[in-house]
Amino acid sequence: MTAKPKVITIIPARLASTRFPGKPLASIQGRPMIEHVYRRCRKIPFVDSVFVATDSSEIEKAVEAFGGKALMTSAAHRSGTDRLAEAASILGLEGSDIVLNVQGDQPALDPSHPSLIAQSLLSDRNLNMATLAVPLTDKNEINDPNHVKVVFDDQGYALYFSRAPIPWPRDGQAGLFYKHIGLYGYTVEFLNKFVLWPVGVLEDLEKLEQLRVLERGFKIKVLLAQGLSPEVDVPEDISKVEIALKASKS
């Protein structure tokens, strides 16, 4: 009998940030941001364990101080996905196990969102990778390259991700846009392949790592979620997150 795959959430975290140095340790309601993210991840259904993967001893100490689990990884990684793969190796995960990639800048994370990804990968063992999207109606965000758009087929598999508004309504009719949410789930076997592939042409143009998967001819399942969890990109975003955290407790 095949053992049930483990589901592990890994939060890549580093101190270096162009717009917000030291972001994971920024204080939110008197606690470091990484603690809020970690505690939210502990509430995700189907998850067996949660780890923070970092190259910073400061972050490691902060995580251990609130009782969390930290993994020290290389400082040479190009991306959080590379850090994820090393963490999975350190943990000795099997190829069939599932890793959820949760960004460390979502202290008000809705646990039901990554749960959708975990449930999808557990129920369909042919899936290699899954992510999320939400309907996008704000015209400013549709035209903002910082808000990534996604189009998908009638089976829910991604056709393309872009910083441009896609699809383009040529005749001026109302378009139906979806915003990509940067939460991912992978089988460990697929994750290990992904990080060995060279950067793709489209990935390099758009600066979107997920396009590497599509360029290689593999599929990404796009699951529709409800609502958005505010992210912290710059210090000014903390006040918005604190409002969201208070509302979630009301």
Image (cartoon, grey):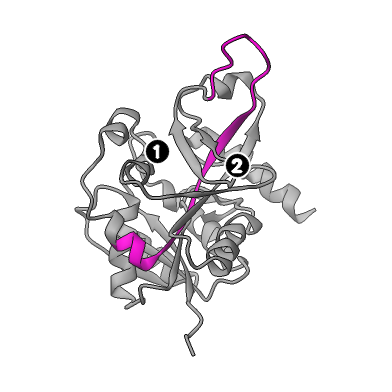
Q: Looking at numbered disc 1 in the image, what kind of residue is underneath it?
A: Phe
Image position, residue 229 (x, y; %): 61, 45
Residue drawn at 55 percent across, 71 percent down:
47
Above or below, 86 relative to 6: above
- Amino acid bearing label 2: Asp
Which residues are drawn in magenta? 167-192
Graded by Cα atoms within 10 Å as few (under 14), some (14 to 19) or many (20 or more), the crowding at tag 2 reads few
Seen at 62% across and 54% down, the residue is 113
Q: Is residue 246 above or below residue 203?
A: below
Closest to the observer: 104 or 149?
149
| Residue 134, quarter of the rendered image | top right
Residue that numbered label 2 is attached to: 154
In front of the other: 112 or 96: 96
Query: Magenta includes 169?
Result: yes
Name the residue at the top extreme: 171
Q: Nearer the viewer, residue 31 or 10?
A: 10
Badge count:
2
Which dot, 2 or 1, sits closer to the camera?
Answer: 2
Residue 55 visible to the viewer:
no
Q: Secondary structure at mark 2?
A: loop
Residue drawn at x 19%, y 53% is 76
Q: Is residue 184 left or right of residue 123?
A: left
Mark identifier at residue 20: 1
Q: In the drawing, what numbered circle is on residue 157?
A: none
Is the residue 179 above or below the residue 227 in the image?
Answer: above
